Image (cartoon, rainbow, N blue to C red):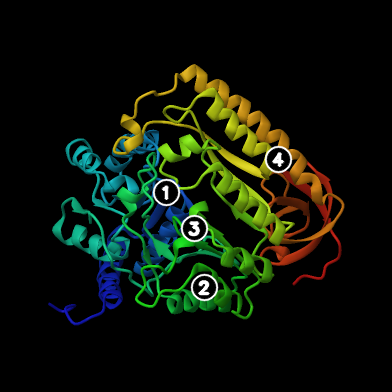
Amino acid sequence: MLTEHLTEAERQYYYMEQCRRWLEEQRSKLGRPLTASVVTFGCQMNARDSEKLRGILENIGYEMIDSEKADFVIYNTCTVRENANLRVYGRLGQMKQIKKKNSSMLIALCGCMMQEPEVVEKLKKSYRHVDLIFGTHNIFKFAELIYRRITENKMVIDIWKDTEQIVEDLPNDRKYSFKTGVNIMFGCNNFCSYCIVPYVRGRERSRQPEDIIREIADAVADGVVEVMLLGQNVNSYGKNLETPISFAELLRRICRIPGLLRVRFMTSHPKDLSDELIRVMAEEPKICRHLHLPLQSGSTEILKKMNRRYTKEDYLLLVDKLRAACPDISLTTDIIVGFPGETEEDFLETMDVVRRVGYDSAYTFIYSKRTGTPAAVMENQVPEAVVKDRFNRLLEEVQNIAAKVCSRHEGTVQDVLVEEINRQDEHLVTGRLSNNTVVHFAGDASMIGKIVPVRLTCCKNFYYMGEAVNLTKK
């Protein structure tokens, strides 16, 4: 076989070239460029995977658009909640009619949802108009799978149960020219009882630090000033490497990259947040003053049932350490209401943590059964009416506290990374503080991607209105 002596990355570039030739033939037949669209569901890990998919499609020669009437539509799916699956099935039903009108159209499905065997069986039986199905572990094979589809002329299904393989140096298409997400690890070993992620993303595997730093340095040379380091649990990065390295040490090395101005990361599991990491966060000015630290519940009893492996007291001690080391840090969190067995007393423990921490914002969720997880078969499921009442009380408390916390910088001058023209008013630009709070102020497109000093004139609960102090941009 022609590719047997190639590295995996070289193999995939070979298949990109084969697909490019096929696409040129299609373009000649149709007398127009062929278009592609990647539709992303779910988390930032999925968003980053979609950048890789778009990069491969552009390398092949597709013209990227946002319409689902493209010649090639790829759904990058999420399966954290079962209703996410229903949304995908709904889209596929609509796509059947669209595809009938475009004989050259291809439809692909990938991502977490595809790692569920029952989903793949349903697609095979009821959605025969889908051309390509693959999962989370072999996204790097996208070009090869496209080649199989166009040469075999039948539905291609390629799902891996797990993998240790990490393939570097494939193309990607960043959504923003000035910031990007960078995977530092894949998979999860935590097995929280409500979570499907370890089953669909596999076990933890970390990238080599040299590969991460090289990717970031290349991105900085291409105009990136901010990176978001991505992993299901970044705090456990490096433990499975042949030469172990801590996440804190990786951060130190990344902060030494010339030209890189901001470093963010998520998600941090409280059980693995070390004193070393807190110290690095305090000492390195490039690390943004924001930490997303999921609580999930303030009840130690519920945390035990969730298999979170920390207590309420452990969590609050971490917050105290963080605030002592980084007094200006913004904390955000995730909270689940109505986990099986949650009593009113358990819920009030959660409310107590919310009041004591004073989060800048919190993502609040009503617990929903996720088939395949231990929590789905637990006894003492909480009645819907009780859950909704607790959720509403929590949401009100979170919003009231967040509005007060957010206003603490009102009247000060802060650096804002400008991200885009404001979507409601073209005379304004929108950016973010180091602590991730959104700011709107008068400006133009020339400011996008630059860090601008802005006076925060008015806090509007969860965002600021401001004015540029001068036109000097970093």
Which residue lies under the disc numbered 4? 402
Q: Residue at x 54, y 62 (%)?
A: 274
How far across and how far down the image is residue 13, in percent?
30, 74
- Residue 81 located left or right of residue 467: left
Q: CA distance from mark 4 to mark 2?
A: 32 Å
**Viewer-nearest of discs 4 and 3:** 3
Dots 4, 1 in contact, CB < 8 A: no
Dots 2, 1 in contact, CB < 8 A: no
Which residue lies under the disc numbered 1? 39
Quadrant (top left/top right/bottom left/bottom right) for the C terminus: bottom right
Camera sees residue 209? yes
How far across and how far down the image is residue 90, in percent?
35, 33
Which residue lies under the disc numbered 3? 272
Q: Secondary structure at mark 2?
A: helix
How far across and how far down the image is residue 429, in percent?
73, 54
Check the image and report above or below for 151 versus 347. Answer: below
Q: Secondary structure at mark 3?
A: helix
Q: CA distance from mark 3 to mark 1?
A: 33 Å
Residue type highlighted by circle 4: Ala
Callout 3: few (<14), some (14-19), or many (20+) C-alpha neighbours within 10 Å? Answer: some
From the viewer's side, name the closer residue of 61 and 213.
Answer: 213
Dot 2 or dot 1: first in sequence order is: 1
Q: CA distance from mark 4 to mark 3?
A: 26 Å
Which residue lies under the disc numbered 2? 250
In which quarter of the view is residue 17 placed? bottom left
In which quarter of the view is residue 25 placed? bottom left
Q: Secondary structure at mark 1?
A: strand
Q: CA distance from mark 2 to mark 1?
A: 32 Å
